[in-house]
Image (spheres, helix red, strand yellow):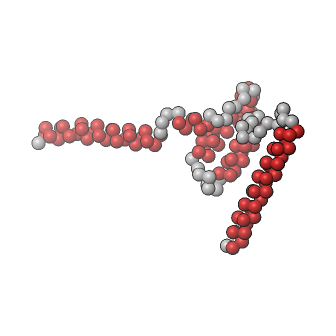
């Protein structure tokens, strides 16, 4: 009977260790996966030369990490996004989704203005529809 117990104790220990290791890896995820989400903000080297720039870069990383843990419906999500946008602007980080107007001629600018006007109309209609829905409640 003693030999049976002495065999099961090490086996149970190994199984417990394997289970906790698996859970820990599942919670943490792949190494570097969380950091890749924050790599989208390429901070200019000039900004990192000043103390203020380094503080803003640290704050930006913190906000990105915080934002990744909340969903878009979280009450603080909008405020966090607004602060991220403000810091990105102060650091001089350009948004790739916003087209650069440098080097655009008149025809391209006119086309851009037309697209923006159509988008604004579409958004105004969506806002009106949502406001009508809210009036029902």
Q: Residue at x 68, y 47 (%)?
A: 81
Whole-percent x and y of residue 109? 85, 41
In front: 97, or 53? Answer: 97
Q: Residue furthest left?
A: 1
Q: Residue furthest right?
A: 106
Q: Residue furthest front?
A: 107
Whole-percent x and y of residue 63? 64, 43
Q: Residue at x 18, y 37 (%)?
A: 7
Q: Quadrant of the N terminus?
A: top left
Whole-percent x and y of residue 55? 70, 35
- 20 shown above or below 79: above
Find residue 88 and report its image quarter: top right
- 133 shown above or below 32: below
Q: Residue at x 72, y 71 (%)?
A: 135
Image side of residue 25 versus residue 53, left or right: left
Q: Residue at x 40, y 42 (%)?
A: 23
Image side of residue 77 versus residue 18, left or right: right
In front: 110, or 32? Answer: 110
Find residue 39 and report its image quarter: top right
Q: Quadrant of the C terminus?
A: bottom right
Find residue 133 and report its image quarter: bottom right
Whole-percent x and y of residue 106? 88, 39
């Amino acid at each position: 009977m003693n030999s049976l117990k002495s065999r099961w104790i090490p086996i149970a220990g190994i199984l417990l260790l394997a289970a906790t290791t698996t859970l820990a890896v599942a919670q943490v995820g792949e190494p570097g996966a969380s950091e890749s989400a924050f790599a989208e903000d390429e901070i200019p080297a000039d900004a990192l030369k000043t103390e203020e720039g380094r503080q803003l870069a640290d704050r930006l990383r913190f906000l990105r990490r915080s934002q990744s843990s909340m969903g878009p419906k979280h009450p603080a999500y909008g405020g966090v996004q607004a602060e991220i946008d403000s810091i990105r602007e102060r650091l001089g980080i350009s948004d790739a989704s916003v087209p650069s107007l440098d080097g655009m001629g008149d025809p391209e600018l006119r086309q851009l203005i037309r697209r923006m006007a159509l988008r604004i109309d579409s958004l105004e209609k969506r806002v009106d529809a949502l406001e009508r829905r809210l009036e029902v409640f």
